[in-house]
Image (cartoon, rainbow, N blue to C red):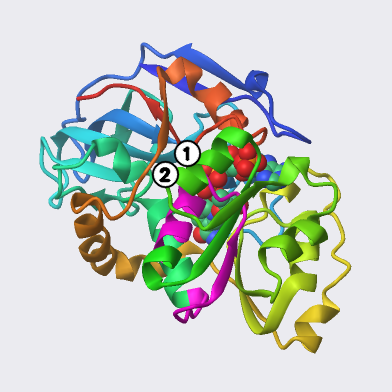
Amino acid sequence: NKQVIFKDFVNGYPKTSDMVVTSDATIRLELPKNETGLILTKNLYLSCDPYMRNRMNQTLEGAYIHSFTPGSPIIGYGVSRILDSSHPDFKKGELIWGLINWEEYSLIKDTSSFMKIQHTDVPLSYYTGILGMPGMTAYVGFYKICSPKKGDTVFVSAASGAVGQLVGQFAKLFGCYVVGSAGSKEKVDLLKNKFGFDEAFNYKEEQDLNAALKRYFPDGIDIYFENVGGKMLDEVLRNMRLFGRIAACGMISQYNLDQPEGTHNLFMIVMKRIRMEGFLVFDHYDSYPKFLETILPLIHEGKINYVEDIVDGLENGPDALIGLFSGSNIGKQVVVIAHE
Ligand code: NDP
């Protein structure tokens, strides 16, 4: 059983060498006879998500999750097939998505995070992204937290990623004017040509982010979908309109810093009566069935596009995961262990 083991707590940017790929021959591929409530899975697709970096810290202030355990496998969202089950709610052959160890096969006791996959007329890898946790994040973040109105001006950072590409398309379908920022020309082209953003820019090429935002939002921003934090947030605050909304989804630019950057323009929240609201997708999974009802037709009717960056092989998982922090992923980063 091949596994990706977390070596030790990380300071600064994570490295491939913070993880090691091993093969554990001691895992028996059968359910124990004297215990019930277990499932044995074959793991197919793994999701690389920015929050996983936070689990590499020894201490997590204000955390909603635990740190990874040194010497144990990395844990993340994934898609699995059930090979065998002694659990009353799960049957052999069923497909599930939820939190799994980064390994080929798992013997699982805690099934609390698993959702059953009912719709298989889409690629199964979609359950790591558009039909899984990041898709729900975009849906809840945009429709619930941003309180959108038709005609609103919307800015999305890290816009070509798993969450951002969907937020931008939801906002377009809703009738908003949408601009995204991303870190390369290729990503900017994707935003404009594939995802239908009205405008997009490469934030790495802008000397003055305030001027860039003024170029695309001469009358200001109604909604900011915040994925990156730091300098971008600071400049966005100066460009928000009165009664604007900021959905604080994530702040990836801060995850590898020992000392988070300061925000200088917070007083704008008062002056412009901005509502800035943090949210975690985990609080909203009761909306998952409604989300599927909304998104599946959009996929089938070709009204929403989705780009994945698929890497083959568990052994390439560590590179794929740390690549999120240099922006090497183009679209949702997925690792394939096996297709079936
Ligand atoms: P992405 O697929 O967008 O991958 C991360 C991207 O972030 C990279 O490709 C890179 O794109 C960008 N990035 C990396 N470092 C920086 C930096 N220093 N400054 C600016 N951009 C950077 O990830 P997701 O879509 O999965 O996640 C997006 C955000 O949403 C993250 O902040 C994540 O933590 C958050 N999130 C929050 C959830 C919640 O429940 N609140 C749930 C899921 C995600 P580029 O080339 O454009 O720089």
How many residues crowd around disc 1 within 10 Å: few (fewer than 14), some, or many (20 or more)?
many
Q: Earlier in the sequence, mark 1 or mark 2?
A: 2
Give the vertical position of 210 relative to 308 (above or below). below
Looking at the image, residue 8 sits to the left or right of residue 197; the answer is right
Q: The residue tagged with tag 2: helix, strand or loop?
A: loop
How many residues crowd around disc 2 within 10 Å: few (fewer than 14), some, or many (20 or more)?
some
Q: Would you identify the image quadrant in which residue 121 lies?
A: top left
Nearest to the observer: residue 142 or residue 290: 142
Nearest to the observer: residue 272 or residue 335: 272
Q: Which residue is mark 2?
A: 194
Q: Is the residue at mark 1 in contact range of ligand 1, meaning its CB lies under 8 Å from it?
A: yes
Residue 79 spot, x, y in % from top left = 30, 38
Region of the chain picked out in magenta, as a range: 145-170
Q: Which residue is mark 1?
A: 331
Task: Report the Cα–Cα distance between label 1 and label 2.
Answer: 11 Å
Which-is-in-front pick, marks 1 and 2? Answer: 2
Looking at the image, residue 107 sits to the left or right of residue 257; the answer is left
Asked whether 169 falls inside the magenta stretch, the response is yes
State the residue at coordinates (23%, 41%). Answer: 38
Residue 2 spot, x, y in % from top left = 40, 16
Give the vertical position of 99 relative to 3 (above or below). below
State the residue at coordinates (23%, 37%). Answer: 123
